[in-house]
Image: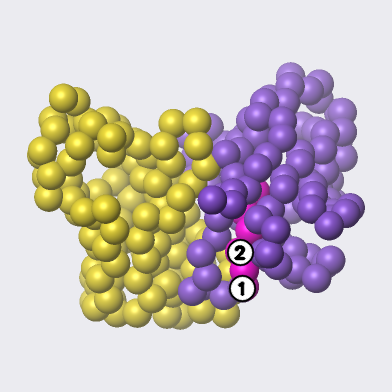
Chain colours: A purple, B yellow
Amino acid sequence: EPEVTQTPSHQVTQMGQEVILRCVPISNHLYFYWYRQILGQKVEFLVSFYNNEISEKSEIFDDQFSVERPDGSNFTLKIRSTKLEDSAMYFCASSEDSGSYNEQFFGPGTRLTVL
Amino acid sequence: GNSVTQMEGPVTLSEEAFLTINCTYTATGYPSLFWYVQYPGEGLQLLLKATKADDKGSNKGFEATYRKETTSFHLEKGSVQVSDSAVYFCALSERSQGNLIFGKGTKLSVKP
């Protein structure tokens, strides 16, 4: 069964460093998403991506964040200069189509720890 | 703005007990409603969904009914199993958008 994969499973970094979180969406999916969950809090939407551009983003997704689809398979989230409050679980998701009727398939997440 | 509120966990039940996890929502339009489940070490998986008022979503013995009058989408299962131990997330999505708005999640532990 096709699945979304994410690497690494756990990333530890120093404050101020850049990190890149990687995701491989399901191959025939066209819409890609990043969410995050700070420990003990809600899963929050960060950004959605379609046709090589951002289609929607939340207030959390400021200039420190960027997304990219560098090749036909990977979808990455870059945090330019990490802060302590960026420590969270980051989930990637993909779907065949957009809109509320379409199921989003999630990866297992990357736990980011900023020291 | 849109939001989802679900009951705080953890919830601990014995096998074959009845489960209810409450979920209420606030939305400006007519959202679709979802329950996602996360088993240990895995990603979020769609458990069930309902796209309009009075719809009932069901899967694996779980069910939830979209109640517009009470803005609720409570998850129920008549007889839980140890394998149901997981974190359950209620979520909504507005019709015109794809992004999901989640509740905090409720951890369920089922003891044999």
**x and y, in percent, of residue A68 in the image:** 85, 54
Disc number at residue B90? none
Magenta span dominant secondary structure = strand
> Residue shown at 88%/54% (left/top)?
A71
Mark 1, secondary structure of its residue: loop
Instruction: Report the span colored magenta.
Output: A92-97
Q: Which residue is mark 1?
A: A98
Residue type marked 1: Ser
Disc 1 crowd rating (10 Å Cα; few below 14, some 14-19, many 20+) is many
**x and y, in percent, of residue A50 in the image:** 75, 68
Nearer the camera: disc 1 or disc 2: 2
Residue type marked 2: Ser
Q: How far is mark 1 from mark 2, CA to CA?
A: 7 Å
The answer, for residue B28, to whether it is visible in the render is no
Q: Which residue is mark 2?
A: A95
- Using the image, name the chain to which the residue with label 2 belongs: A
The question of residue A93 being in magenta is answered with yes
Would you say the residues marked 1 and 2 are in contact, meaning their CB atoms lie under 8 Å apart?
A: yes
Mark 2, secondary structure of its residue: strand
